Image: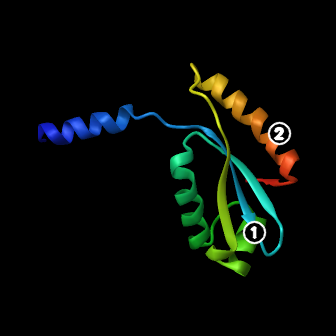
Amino acid sequence: MSIDRKAAIAAYKERKTIAGIYVVCCAASGEAWVGQAANLETIQNRIWFSLRQGGHPCRSLQAAWSTHGETGLTFGECERLEDEETDYVRNALLKERMLHWRSALKAEAI
């Protein structure tokens, strides 16, 4: 393995991830879904992939995708969390903030 490749792998493993709360909205139906993610940078690709495959666990979100298509849904960040010392604190904060955003947006959980 080359030194450049090893350095790239090490840099990838040490990268900072940004945890937070996100929302997926359907303009046509007015529905919204709120979720939490340990990495906001990658969550949209993961959700869109599972929706394209027809196997997203949130049935109402999958139904909206099937009815309105990819262009009918939008993805947005609600809140980014500060870098926390421990996973326990981060996860507790994510849970608390997700409940807040679900209530504020009258949204279903993803």
Q: Report the residue marked by disc 2.
A: 100
Q: Which residue occupies 63% across, 67% down?
A: 55
- The tag earlier along the polypeptide, 1 or 2, is 1
Residue 20: x, y in percent? 64, 40
Label 1 crowding class (10 Å Cα cut-off): few <14, some 14-19, many 20+? many
> Helix, strand or loop at disc 1?
strand
Q: Position of residue 106 (x, y in %)?
A: 88, 53
Q: Quadrant of residue 44?
A: bottom right
Q: Which mark is residue 85?
A: none
The span from disc 1 to disc 2 (Cα, nearest Å) is: 20 Å
Mark 1 touching mark 2, by CB under 8 A?
no
Look at the numbered disc 2 and give the secondary structure of its residue: helix
Q: Which mark is residue 26?
A: 1
Residue type, numbered disc 2: His
- How many numbered marks appear? 2
Q: Is residue 19 above or below residue 24?
A: above
Residue at the extreme bottom of the image, as rendered: 67
In this rendering, position of residue 1 left or right of residue 110: left
Q: Position of residue 3 (x, y in %)?
A: 13, 36
Q: Determine the residue located farthest toward the left in the rendered image.
A: 2
Category of crowding for the residue at label 2, using alpha-carbon neighbours closer than 10 angstroms: few (below 14), some (14–19), many (at least 20):
few
What amino acid type is highlighted by mark number 1? Cys
Asked if residue 19 is positioned above or below residue 31 in the image, the reply reads above
